[in-house]
Image (tube, coloured by chain):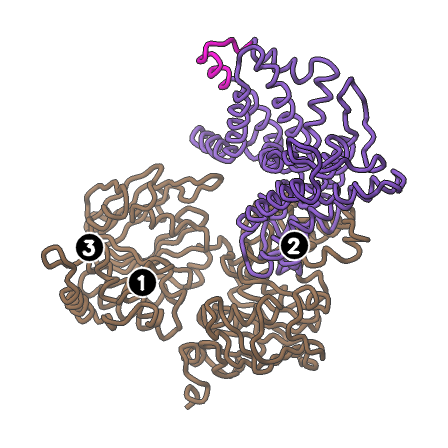
Chain colours: A brown, B purple
C-alpha cells in the first residue's frame, strides 16, 4: 500500500474494513486491490466517475458479489457473505440507486416485506404500522405509513428504503448515488436525515460523483479511479479541485466557457402540446416552447416528469394528442421520424443503447442510420459501401472515436465512444434543429467536456438546440434559457445568469416561477 | 479461436452434425445393429448413383426455399411458422393458374405460374404481417392459424371443385407449357430444374440482405426495432414487407413442387416441408449459403434413410440425428458462454 494513502490507525474503531479487494469481470478489472476503511459512526463518501468500481465494491460488501481476492471485516469480524441475507444479519443495509419497492403496497407493508410482523400465523398489519411509525419518528424520517408507494414522491420512497434497512437492524447503511433522483431541496432533507442517523451512532457509506455533496456531508472520502483507490482524504482537509483531480487523473475544467451570442429567428416551436405515456395517462400537459437559431434552450426537471414523452413526440416517435409542432415554418405535427430527419432535425436520444445504436451493426452502419436511404450512402436501393466506409473513417477522425475500427460492432465500444458515434452521426446531418437528451449520462468527465464543447460548436453554427437534462450543472452551463418541467407542465422560464440552483430546484419540485420569485 | 469469432458460424453446425452422427450411432448399437453398416447404407442411399443423387436434389429444392423463407423472417425479427401454409397456398394457386395456361407458350406460362405462386405465398404471409403491424397480434399465433386454414382450404379444393381420379385427393395436371423442364431424366425420375431457381433465390436473398438499403432496414428492424424506428424506418411497414418476402419464398417452394415434381396439386404435397424450413434455417444460421447446405444435409438424410431401412435400421434414426443437430446449433450460445467462462477462469 502506498504510504501516502495511510492505513489502519490502531486507535480507531472500524465498522468496515475491506482489504485488497479484487474483482474481475470479463475484460474488466472492476476492483484492483481496493482498500476501504470506514470508521464507526462516520459518514464516509466513496467518489469516482461512472465505471470507477464504486458500486461493484459496495455490492461485494452487501454480499451481492463475491470478491476474487481480498478480505472483508465487519465490526472487526472477518466475514464471507454468501448473499445479502447474511450481510443484513451482520447489520448492513443498502439503499440501491433503483428502489426495490412494491408499487401497489403501502409504506408499512413494504417495510416489513420479507420479515413480516406476525400474530400467530397471520400477518399483523397494525404491529407493522406501529413499528414503522416508531422508526420514522425516532430518526425523523417523515413518511405516510398507509400511503401506497405509487402515490408518494420519490424523496419519500427513498425514506421508506432507509426505514426498511433500519427495520432489519442496519448499523451500517450503504447509499448508492442517493441524490441522483432528488431535487436540491429533497437532497438537503436527505442530508439532515443522514446527520441524525450519524448522531444516533449509525455508520453511513455514501456513494456519489457530485463533489459539492461530498464536501457538505462526509467526514472522510475514498476516491476511486478505474478500479483503484487513488486517494483517502479527510473532508475537512481537502477541496473539490483536489478530489476531481484524483477522480479523473488530471486537472479538469468543471465548467465550459460559453460566448455570448444573439440568437436568430425561431426555428422550432411547440404550441400547447399534449402527449400520453405508455399507460395512457397524460404525461405532457400543454407544453409550449420556442427555440431560435443559435440558441440552446434547456429543460430541467427530475426524471419522469414527461421529458421522455415530450422528446418522443417532438421527434415523431410518439403520437401527439393535441397541440402543434412547427419546424422551420411548417406544421410538422404527426410527421414521421424520417420526414423530420429529412427536413433537418437531429436527435441525440437519452437511451443510446435502446434508440441510438444498433449494437449488432458495425460502427460504419451505425454512422449512417437515419440517412442510410439517401445519396451518397444509397443509390437506387443499393448501399454504397465505399462512401459508407469513407464517411465512417472521416467521422472517427473528426470525433476521435476509439479504437479507430469502424468495422467493430457498435456494442463493443465503450459508453463514451458509443455516445461519440451517436453524436457524430447526428451532427454530420448538418441539422437545423437538434433535440439533445441526457447527452452525458454515464460518461466520464473527459468525454463530458468533449460533448459540451461540441454542443456549443453547433450553437455557434446557428443550430437551434433543445437540451433535456437531469444534471442541473449541465443545464446551467450550456443553456441560454432554462425551462423547468414538473409533471408534464412548464413551471417557468428563466436564464442561468438570472437565477440560482435553489430557485430552479424549487420549480423542479412543483413550485411556479412566480411563487419562487416571491 | 476466440469465442465470438465468425468462424464459429461454420464450425458449430459441422461439429453438431458429427456429434449427432456419433450419438445416433450409440442408439443404433443399442438396438443391436452396426452403425457403420447403417451409415454406409445412408450414404449409398443419398449419393450412390445418379438416381439417388437426383432424389436428394429433388428433396433439397423445397427445403432451400422454405429455409430461406424462415431465415429471412428471423433476420427481420419475425418468426414465420407459417411457411407450411404459405407453401400450400403457393402450390394451390399456381396449380389453379397452371391448369388454365394451355394455349400460352412456356416462356410466358412458366414465369407467370411461378410468380403467381410467390404472390399467393406473399399474400398469405402478409395477412399475419399486417395483423401484427396493426394490432400487435403475434405472428406465431396467426401464422399457425393460417396454416390450418390453408391445409383445409386446399384439401377441400382437391376433394371437391378440382378433384380428379380416385385415391389420394389430387387436382388435374397443369398445362404442359407450365411445367418446368427437367434438368436430367433418369429412368422415371425427372430431376427438376427448380434447384437452379432455389439457388438463384438464395443468391438474391444474400444480395438483398447484404447489399441493399432494404436489407439494411430489414436487419436493423430485426436487431433493434426501437433504434430502427428512431432512424426513420417504419416498423409496421417493415413487418408486413418482411412477412410478404418470407411468404413469397415459401410460395415459390410450393409452386416449384407443382411445376417441377408432381405437376399437380396433391393433398400430401407440402408434407411438413414448411416446418422443416425452421430446422433448415436454424442449422444454416439464417444465412443464405448456410441454408443451402443445411437443406442439402436434411435432404440427404431423408433420401438416405430409405436405404438404411433395408439393412434393418429404422429410418426414424435420422429424426434423432436431425433433432440433435438442431439442439446443438440452438445451444450454440450456451456452448460459447461456457467456453468464454472457461477462458476467463484460466486467465
Q: Residues within 10 Å of mark 3 (few under 14, many from 20)?
A: few
Q: What is the C-alpha distance between the residues marked 3 and 1?
A: 32 Å
From the top left corner, tell me how far across and down residue A78 is, in percent.
Answer: 22, 41
**Mark 3 secondary-structure assignment:** loop
Give the percent coordinates (x, y) of residue A40.
21, 55
In the rendered image, residue B28 lying in the magenta stretch gets the answer yes
Q: Which residue is mark 2?
A: B240
Q: Of the residues tagged 2 and 3, which is closer to the observer?
A: 2
* Distance (Cα) linking label 2 and label 1: 58 Å
* Lateral position of residue B107 relative to residue B190, left or right: right
Q: Main secondary structure of the magenta part?
A: helix
User: What is the C-alpha distance between the residues marked 2 and 3?
Assistant: 51 Å
Q: Which residues are magenta?
A: B23-36
Q: Which residue is mark 3?
A: A115
Q: Nearer the viewer, mark 3 or mark 1?
A: 3
Q: Identify residue for label 1.
A: A218
Amino acid at each position: 500500500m502506498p504510504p501516502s494513502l495511510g492505513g489502519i490507525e490502531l486507535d480507531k474503531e472500524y465498522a468496515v474494513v475491506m482489504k485488497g479487494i479484487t474483482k474481475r469481470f470479463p475484460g474488466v478489472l472492476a476492483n484492483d486491490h481496493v482498500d476501504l476503511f470506514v470508521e464507526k459512526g462516520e459518514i464516509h463518501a466513496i467518489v469516482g466517475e461512472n465505471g470507477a468500481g464504486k458500486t461493484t465494491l459496495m455490492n461485494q460488501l452487501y454480499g451481492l458479489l463475491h470478491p476474487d481476492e481480498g478480505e472483508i471485516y465487519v465490526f472487526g469480524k472477518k466475514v464471507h457473505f454468501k448473499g445479502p441475507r447474511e450481510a443484513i444479519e451482520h447489520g448492513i443495509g443498502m439503499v440501491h440507486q433503483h428502489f426495490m419497492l412494491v408499487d401497489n403496497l403501502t409504506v408499512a407493508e413494504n417495510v416489513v416485506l420479507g420479515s413480516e410482523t406476525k400474530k400467530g400465523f397471520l400477518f399483523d398489519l397494525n404491529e407493522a404500522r406501529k413499528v414503522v411509525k416508531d422508526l420514522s419518528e425516532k430518526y425523523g424520517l417523515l413518511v405516510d405509513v398507509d400511503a401506497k408507494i405509487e402515490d408518494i414522491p420519490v424523496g419519500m420512497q427513498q425514506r421508506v428504503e432507509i426505514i426498511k434497512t433500519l427495520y432489519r437492524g442496519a448499523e451500517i447503511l450503504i447509499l448508492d448515488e442517493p441524490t441522483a433522483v432528488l431535487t436540491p431541496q429533497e437532497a438537503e432533507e436527505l442530508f439532515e436525515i443522514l446527520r441524525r442517523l450519524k448522531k444516533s451512532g449509525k455508520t453511513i457509506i455514501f456513494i456519489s460523483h457530485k463533489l459539492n455533496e461530498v464536501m457538505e456531508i462526509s467526514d472522510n472520502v475514498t476516491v476511486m479511479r478505474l478500479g483503484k483507490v487513488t486517494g483517502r482524504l479527510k473532508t475537512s482537509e481537502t477541496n473539490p479541485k483536489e478530489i476531481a483531480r484524483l477522480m479523473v487523473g488530471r486537472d479538469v475544467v468543471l465548467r465550459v466557457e460559453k460566448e455570448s451570442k444573439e440568437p436568430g429567428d425561431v426555428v422550432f416551436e411547440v404550441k400547447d402540446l399534449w402527449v400520453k405515456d405508455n399507460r395512457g395517462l397524460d404525461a405532457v400537459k400543454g407544453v409550449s416552447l420556442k427555440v431560435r437559431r443559435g440558441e440552446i434552450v434547456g429543460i430541467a426537471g427530475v426524471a419522469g416528469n414527461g421529458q421522455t414523452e415530450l422528446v418522443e413526440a417532438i421527434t415523431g416517435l410518439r403520437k401527439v394528442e393535441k397541440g402543434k409542432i412547427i419546424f422551420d415554418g411548417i406544421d410538422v405535427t404527426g410527421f414521421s421520424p424520417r420526414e423530420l430527419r429529412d427536413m433537418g432535425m437531429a436527435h441525440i436520444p437519452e437511451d443510446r443503447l435502446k434508440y441510438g445504436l444498433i449494437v449488432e451493426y458495425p460502427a460504419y452502419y451505425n454512422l449512417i442510420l437515419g440517412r442510410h436511404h439517401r445519396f451518397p450512402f444509397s443509390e437506387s436501393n443499393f448501399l454504397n459501401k465505399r462512401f459508407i466506409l469513407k464517411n465512417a473513417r472521416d467521422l472517427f477522425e473528426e470525433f476521435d472515436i476509439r479504437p479507430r475500427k469502424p468495422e467493430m460492432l457498435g456494442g463493443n465500444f465503450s459508453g463514451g465512444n458509443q455516445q461519440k458515434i451517436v453524436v457524430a452521426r447526428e451532427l454530420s446531418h448538418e441539422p437545423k434543429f437538434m433535440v439533445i437528451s441526457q447527452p452525458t449520462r454515464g460518461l466520464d468527465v473527459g468525454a463530458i467536456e468533449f460533448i459540451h464543447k461540441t454542443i456549443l460548436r453547433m450553437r455557434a453554427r446557428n443550430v437551434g438546440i433543445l437540451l433535456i437534462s437531469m444534471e442541473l450543472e449541465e443545464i446551467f452551463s450550456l443553456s441560454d434559457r432554462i425551462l423547468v418541467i414538473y409533471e408534464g407542465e412548464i413551471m417557468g422560464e428563466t436564464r442561468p445568469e438570472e437565477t440560482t440552483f435553489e430557485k430552479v430546484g424549487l420549480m423542479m419540485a412543483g413550485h411556479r416561477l412566480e411563487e419562487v420569485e416571491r | 479461436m476466440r469465442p465470438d469469432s465468425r468462424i464459429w458460424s461454420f464450425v458449430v453446425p459441422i461439429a453438431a452434425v458429427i456429434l449427432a452422427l456419433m450419438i445416433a450411432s450409440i442408439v443404433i448399437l443399442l438396438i443391436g445393429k452396426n452403425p457403420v453398416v447403417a451409415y454406409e447404407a445412408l450414404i449409398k442411399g443419398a449419393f450412390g448413383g445418379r438416381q439417388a443423387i437426383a432424389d436428394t436434389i429433388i428433396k433439397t429444392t423445397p427445403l432451400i426455399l422454405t429455409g430461406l423463407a424462415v431465415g429471412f423472417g428471423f433476420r427481420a425479427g419475425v418468426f414465420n411458422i407459417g411457411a407450411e401454409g404459405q407453401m400450400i397456398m403457393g402450390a394451390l394457386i399456381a396449380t389453379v393458374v397452371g391448369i388454365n395456361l394451355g394455349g400460352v407458350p412456356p416462356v410466358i406460362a412458366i414465369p407467370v405460374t411461378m410468380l403467381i405462386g410467390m404472390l399467393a405465398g406473399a399474400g398469405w404471409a402478409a395477412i399475419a404481417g399486417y395483423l401484427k403491424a396493426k394490432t400487435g397480434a403475434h405472428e406465431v399465433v396467426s401464422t399457425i392459424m393460417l396454416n390450418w386454414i390453408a391445409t383445409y382450404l386446399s384439401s377441400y379444393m382437391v376433394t371437391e371443385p378440382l378433384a380428379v381420379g380416385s385415391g389420394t385427393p389430387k387436382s388435374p395436371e397443369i398445362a404442359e407449357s407450365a411445367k418446368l423442364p427437367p434438368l436430367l431424366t433418369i429412368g422415371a425420375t425427372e430431376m427438376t430444374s427448380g434447384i437452379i431457381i432455389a439457388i438463384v433465390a438464395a443468391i438474391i436473398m444474400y444480395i438483398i440482405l447484404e447489399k441493399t438499403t432494404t436489407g439494411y432496414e430489414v436487419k436493423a428492424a430485426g436487431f433493434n426495432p426501437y433504434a430502427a424506428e428512431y432512424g426513420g424506418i417504419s416498423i409496421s411497414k417493415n413487418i408486413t414487407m418482411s412477412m410478404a418476402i418470407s411468404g413469397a419464398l415459401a410460395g415459390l417452394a410450393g409452386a416449384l413442387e407443382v411445376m417441377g415434381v408432381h405437376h399437380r396439386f396433391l393433398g400430401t404435397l407440402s408434407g411438413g416441408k414448411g416446418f422443416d424450413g425452421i430446422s433448415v434455417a436454424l442449422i444454416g444460421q439464417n444465412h443464405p449459403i448456410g441454408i443451402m447446405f443445411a437443406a442439402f444435409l436434411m435432404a440427404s438424410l431423408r433420401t438416405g434413410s430409405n436405404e438404411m431401412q433395408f439393412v434393418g435400421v429404422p429410418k426414424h434414426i435420422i429424426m434423432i440425428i436431425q433433432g440433435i443437430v438442431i439442439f446443438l446449433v440452438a445451444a450454440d450460445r450456451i456452448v460459447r458462454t461456457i467456453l468464454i467462462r472457461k477462458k476467463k477462469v484460466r486467465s
